Amino acid sequence: MIKCIRDSYYKEAKRRGLRSRAAFKLLEISRKFSIIKKGDIVLDLGAAPGGWLQIARMLTGENGKVIGVDISPIKPLPYSNVFIIRKDVRDPSLIDDIRKISGGEVDVILSDLAPKFSGFHHLDHFRQISLVKYTISIANSLLKKHGNMVIKIIMGSEVNKLIKEISNNFNYVKLYKPKASRKHSSEIYLICKEWKEKS
Ligand SMILES: C[S@@+](CC[C@H](N)C(=O)[O-])C[C@H]1O[C@@H](n2cnc3c(N)ncnc32)[C@H](O)[C@@H]1O
């Protein structure tokens, strides 16, 4: 059954020319929680191969901007308002690179960041939470007041503490597992709306 669902998302992504089946996760999340609107400046962390970039571009339209960051290469998209930065999110010079493109802050931060999985759940959880913390630190520098954020999280012992911390900064925080996320996977998405203030 799981294989069947996976195959249907995979086939549909191929049919629509989407670079990843993960694209459907963002599409569902953004529609359900009104994350990205026309004209937004969207920052996508961990963007390769580019499925979320394609959806973000579709939702923000020609008047917005989409900036993708990844340590792996991303094939350019055929839009003048989609920008790609090949860099580690832990590199402090990234903030200036993004500001040069966005002109200042951003409306939405997306993070589908995932480390190379070791197969040891505890280790993978801690590595992934460390990437989430870099996302939050980038939000502290770049997210506009009332901006939205979507972050992938690998479930584990640190999640409750993390949600408590993040909840101080947003008016609305909710964990959500989109339909395209494999049922047996420990990934879940943290939906954060209306950034209040810098922590
Ligand atoms: C699940 S993939 C993202 C898929 C993407 N959302 C899509 O739809 O095509 C996770 C990405 O995180 C990237 N990544 C992991 N650690 C990173 C880091 N420290 N800095 C930048 N990118 C990183 C990986 O290279 C990988 O491409």
Image (cartoon, rainbow, N blue to C red):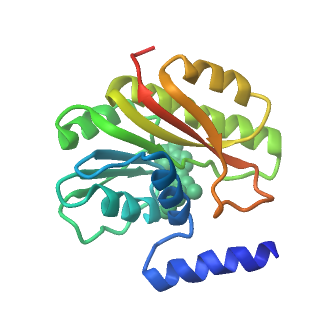
Q: Position of residue 157 (x, y in %)?
A: 79, 30
Q: Position of residue 40 (x, y in %)?
A: 27, 46
Q: Is residue 155 left or right of residue 52?
A: right
Q: Residue at x 44, y 81 (%)?
A: 16
Front-lying residue, 22 or 74? 22
**Placement of 62 over or under 193, stated as above or below:** below
Q: Position of residue 69 (x, y in %)?
A: 39, 49
Q: Residue at x 19, y 60 (%)?
A: 62
Tell me which corner region of the image, top left, top right, bottom left or bottom right, holds residue 80.
Answer: bottom left
| Quarter in which the C terminus is drawn | top left
Q: Is residue 43 left or right of residue 182?
A: left
**Placement of 197 over or under 79, stated as above or below:** above
Front-lying residue, 125 or 199? 199
| Quarter in which the N terminus is drawn | bottom right
Q: Residue at x 67, y 38 (%)?
A: 127
Tell me which corner region of the image, top left, top right, bottom left or bottom right, holds residue 196.
Answer: top left
Residue reaching furthest top? Answer: 199
Q: Residue at x 71, y 34 (%)?
A: 126
Number of callouts: 0
Front-lying residue, 186 or 134? 186
Q: Position of residue 17 (x, y in %)?
A: 43, 80
Q: Is residue 79 left or right of residue 153?
A: left
**Placement of 18 over or under 94, stated as above or below:** below
